[in-house]
């Protein structure tokens, strides 16, 4: 049964991307068919703007991106945010000081870029399982000496903290701590990470904010995702789609469970419910 959908928000890793971090030709073609019909299709990702994949941005008709778990909506033509929901710099600086005392790999997203304490670069191998991912981190992280002071002295409001762990007990402890912190929304995308956003920032709130900017009713929004940092988007969208490879909890809250990310699940959902 076709739905009246005018915006489609797509998570990237585990959703639009296959396991080897590529988008199949079929999925590209289906997304471009949707944009050709006037439907707004955009990435809704935990990545910062500078980490957005060119493979997605190069598709015809892709005009916006929700980044850093909903902390920012970027107009891809102007490369400027049209909506922000940031962590105030005083809280960001204080939190960075505290997190740097822990045995974790912590970085912070600011103005579309990702910054990391310089001394942590040599510890990538302690927290990152494969050389390919470690190389991605080296390319996308900007090393800074005394990062907390840089944030504080330059009044840099932050989009998101991202943490990786090799101690799962510490991860559970910090997740519990930040779940109770009134300044932060704590989510997880993979088994060994933790992501901290402003308490009111999530992909779902950003998706509906974009709908408001474009004067589109909320019930004409659709979201596809697979993990816990997609939960708010899947709950708030007018029509929600969980990937076949999604966490069981995400499948339970969605309107439809599509095929896996290895089986063009995004394309299947768009073809089934959206394309005329």
Image: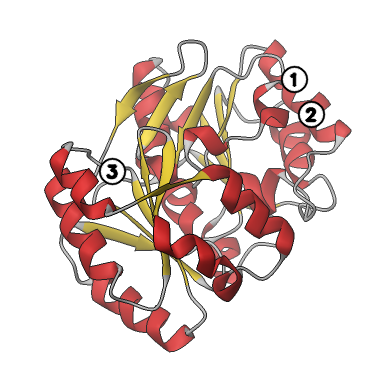
Distance in Å between CA atoms under marks 1 and 2 = 6 Å
Residue hosting label 1: 32
Q: Residue at 27% across / 37% down in the picture? A: 85
* 3 or 2: tag closer to the N-terminus: 2
The x, y position of residue 86, in whole percent, is: 25, 40
Label 3 close to label 2 by CB (< 8 Å) = no
Element carrying mark 2:
helix
Residue hosting label 2: 28
Q: Residue at 41% across / 63% down in the picture? A: 119
Query: How packed is label 1: few (under 14 Cα within 10 Å), some, or many (20 or more)?
Result: some
* 3 or 1: tag closer to the N-terminus: 1
Distance in Å between CA atoms under marks 3 and 2 = 32 Å
Query: How packed is label 3: few (under 14 Cα within 10 Å), some, or many (20 or more)?
Result: many
Image position of 135 (left or right of 252)? right
In this view, the mark in front (3 or 2): 3
* In front of the other: 34 or 177: 177
Label 1 close to label 2 by CB (< 8 Å) = yes
Element carrying mark 3:
loop
The quarter of the rendered structure image containing the C terminus is top right
Image position of 248 (left or right of 130)? left
Q: Residue at 65% across / 62% down in the picture? A: 246
The x, y position of residue 219, in whole percent, is: 45, 32
The quarter of the rendered structure image containing the N terminus is top right
Classify 152 as above or below 74. below
Residue hosting label 3: 158
**Residue 276 visible, this angle:** no
Q: Residue at 85% across / 50% down in the picture? A: 263
Distance in Å between CA atoms under marks 3 and 1 = 33 Å
């Amino acid at each position: 049964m076709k739905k009246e959908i005018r915006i489609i928000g797509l998570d990237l890793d585990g959703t639009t991307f296959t396991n080897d971090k590529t988008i199949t030709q079929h999925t590209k073609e289906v997304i471009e068919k949707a944009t050709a019909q006037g439907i707004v299709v955009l990435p809704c990702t935990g990545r910062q703007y500078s980490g957005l994949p060119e493979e997605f941005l190069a598709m015809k008709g892709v005009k916006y991106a929700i980044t850093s778990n909903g902390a920012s909506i970027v107009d891809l033509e102007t490369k400027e945010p049209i909506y922000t929901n940031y962590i105030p710099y005083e809280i960001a600086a204080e939190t960075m000081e505290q997190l740097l005392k822990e045995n974790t790999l912590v970085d912070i997203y600011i103005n579309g870029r990702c910054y990391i304490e310089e001394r942590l670069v040599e510890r990538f191998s302690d927290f990152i399982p494969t050389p390919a991912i470690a190389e991605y981190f080296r390319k996308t992280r900007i090393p800074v000496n005394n990062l907390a002071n840089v944030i504080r002295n330059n009044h840099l409001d932050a989009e998101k903290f991202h943490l990786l762990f090799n101690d799962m007990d510490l991860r559970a402890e910090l997740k519990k701590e930040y779940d109770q912190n009134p300044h932060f929304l704590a989510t997880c995308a993979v088994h060994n990470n933790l992501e901290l956003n402003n308490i009111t920032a999530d992909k779902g709130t950003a998706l509906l904010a974009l709908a408001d900017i474009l004067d589109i009713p909320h019930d004409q929004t659709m979201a596809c995702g697979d993990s816990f940092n997609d939960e708010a988007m899947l709950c708030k969208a007018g029509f929600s789609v969980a990937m076949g490879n999604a966490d069981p909890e995400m499948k339970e809250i969605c309107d439809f469970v599509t095929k896996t990310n290895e089986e063009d699940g995004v394309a299947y959902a768009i073809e089934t419910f959206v394309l005329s």
